[in-house]
Image: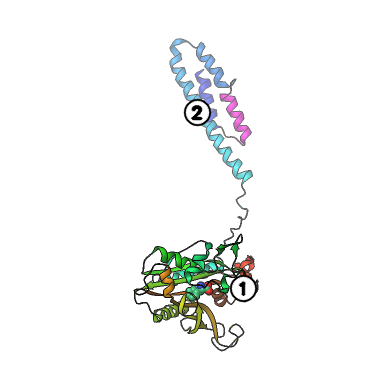
């Protein structure tokens, strides 16, 4: 019996399998229910008592050797099976399609970043608002045409609930709840009932700004907007303020920048004037401050508002507003940036 065990041990040590079937045959030959080891255990039972101890130990060694070899063969064939048949490492990888930010998002972030450097914080509000925050608090007279059905989308024929027509609503809400100094930027989507064309849409995006403190003057407004124009477009950009009217600011102005497309020489974007309008602004009307419980004797401030689409069109020389909302990747893919 000893010789048998020794020869099996040698056989196990020398065994190599060509494939998974050969490995399985090996397992069955030694460890199967009717395998060689099973036979040997029967022999062991019948062996003389004084040899049992030594033989038992040898049998154990044999069993361990057979089991170890089986385990090794198993992992060997599991691995080759995987790399051999299910994974082809030479296949080209699936291409990873990287997305890009929408041009309006790029410009919105840029505007926010410029004003953040001089202390403006972002404030946000709801797109569905009431008449008070969109109009009344901002000094719009009862019969102002902007309240008209032609300009404003009302919700379910309720003249008190509407889609905000500007983000000045956020300014009102901030003034109601915070005390000066206030320095905020209100980016967001706004809605107006306008015919869709290359220059107008029924919704667009705005950023409005508000600064209220003691002793804020029109000079502060002008310098702030000059800084913005030069950071946004180029260091040699000029600005021009033209008197205008908004119910919530007094005095009010519209701001032009020197045309960045023809550098002021005249082109069809600036209609050969050398200037393009980019925003509205003015000193916050004392009546608005009063509506929001801020003492106009003590505090003054300025506000400004711009359309992100307009800034983006000028910056990237896009000539049709509608293309921003088509989501055509051939257009969107061209923009990279912050
Ligand atoms: N709210 C104005 C608009 O939507 C823009 C504006 C904001 C003008 C602040 C002046 C001051 O047209």
| In the displayed structure image, the side of residue 209 where residue 148 appears, left or right | right
Question: Could you tell me residue 222's position as x and y percent?
Answer: 43, 81
Whether 329 is among the magenta residues is: no
Callout 2: helix, strand or loop? helix
Q: Of label 2 and label 1, which has the lower sequence position?
A: 2
Where is residue 1? Give x, y as percent. Answer: 51, 17
- Residue 22, percent from left and from top: 62, 32
Give the residue drawn at x 53%, y 35%: 72
Please report the residue visible at 56 percent of the width from the left and 77 percent of the height from the top.
Answer: 314
The residue sitting at 50% across, 28% down in the picture is 65
On whether ligand 1 comes within 8 Å of the CB at mark 1, the answer is no
- Tell which of 106 and 336 is nearer to you: 106
In terms of image quadrants, where is residue 269? bottom right
How many residues crowd around disc 2 within 10 Å: few (fewer than 14), some, or many (20 or more)?
A: some
Residue 305 in view, yes or no? no
Q: Main secondary structure of the magenta part?
A: helix
Looking at the image, which is closer to me, 146 or 283?
Answer: 146
Instruction: Identify the element where label 1 is drawn.
Output: loop
Whether residue 330 is visible, yes or no, is yes
Q: Which mark is residue 65?
A: 2
Q: Is residue 149 left or right of residue 126?
A: right
Q: Which residue is mark 1?
A: 200
x%, y% of residue 181?
36, 69
Which mark, by number, is residue 49?
none
Rounded to the nearest angstrom, the CA distance separating label 2 from label 1 is 84 Å
Q: Quick check: 240 above or below 46? A: below
Give the residues drawn in magenta, as a range: 15-32
- Please report contact status of discs 2 and 1: CB closer than 8 Å, yes or no: no
How many callouts does the rendering have?
2
> Residue furthest toward the bottom?
265
Viewer-side residue, 128 vs 67 = 128
């Amino acid at each position: 019996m000893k010789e048998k065990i020794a020869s099996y041990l040698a056989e196990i040590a020398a065994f190599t399998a060509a494939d998974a079937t050969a490995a399985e045959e090996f397992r069955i030959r030694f460890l199967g229910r009717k395998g060689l080891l099973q036979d040997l255990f029967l022999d062991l039972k019948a062996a003389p008592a004084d040899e049992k101890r030594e033989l038992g130990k040898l049998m154990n060694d044999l069993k361990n050797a057979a089991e170890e070899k089986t385990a090794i063969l198993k992992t060997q064939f599991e691995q080759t099976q995987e790399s051999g048949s299910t994974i082809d490492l030479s296949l080209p990888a699936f291409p990873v399609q990287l997305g890009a930010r929408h041009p309006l998002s790029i410009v919105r972030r840029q505007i926010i970043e410029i004003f953040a450097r001089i202390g403006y914080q972002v404030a946000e509000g709801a797109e569905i608002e009431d008449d008070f925050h969109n109009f009344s608090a901002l000094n719009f007279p009862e019969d102002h045409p902007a309240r008209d059905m032609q300009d404003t989308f009302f919700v379910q024929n309720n003249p008190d609930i509407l889609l905000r027509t500007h983000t000045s609503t956020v300014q009102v809400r901030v003034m109601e709840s915070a005390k000066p100094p206030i320095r905020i930027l209100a980016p967001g989507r706004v809605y107006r009932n306008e015919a869709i064309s290359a220059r107008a849409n029924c919704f667009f995006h705005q950023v409005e700004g508000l600064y209220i403190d003691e002793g804020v003057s029109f000079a502060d407004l002008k310098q702030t907007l000059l800084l913005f124009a030069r950071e946004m477009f180029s260091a040699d950009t000029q600005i021009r303020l033209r008197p205008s009217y908004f119910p919530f600011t007094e005095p009010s102005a519209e701001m032009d920048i020197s045309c960045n497309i023809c550098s002021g020489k005249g082109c069809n974007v600036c209609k050969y004037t050398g200037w393009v309008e980019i925003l509205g602004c003015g000193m916050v009307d004392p009546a608005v401050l009063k509506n929001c419980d801020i003492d106009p004797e003590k505090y003054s401030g300025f506000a400004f508002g711009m359309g992100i689409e307009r800034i983006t069109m000028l910056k990237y020389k896009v000539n049709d507003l509608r293309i921003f909302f088509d989501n055509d990747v051939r257009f969107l893919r061209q923009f990279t940036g912050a």
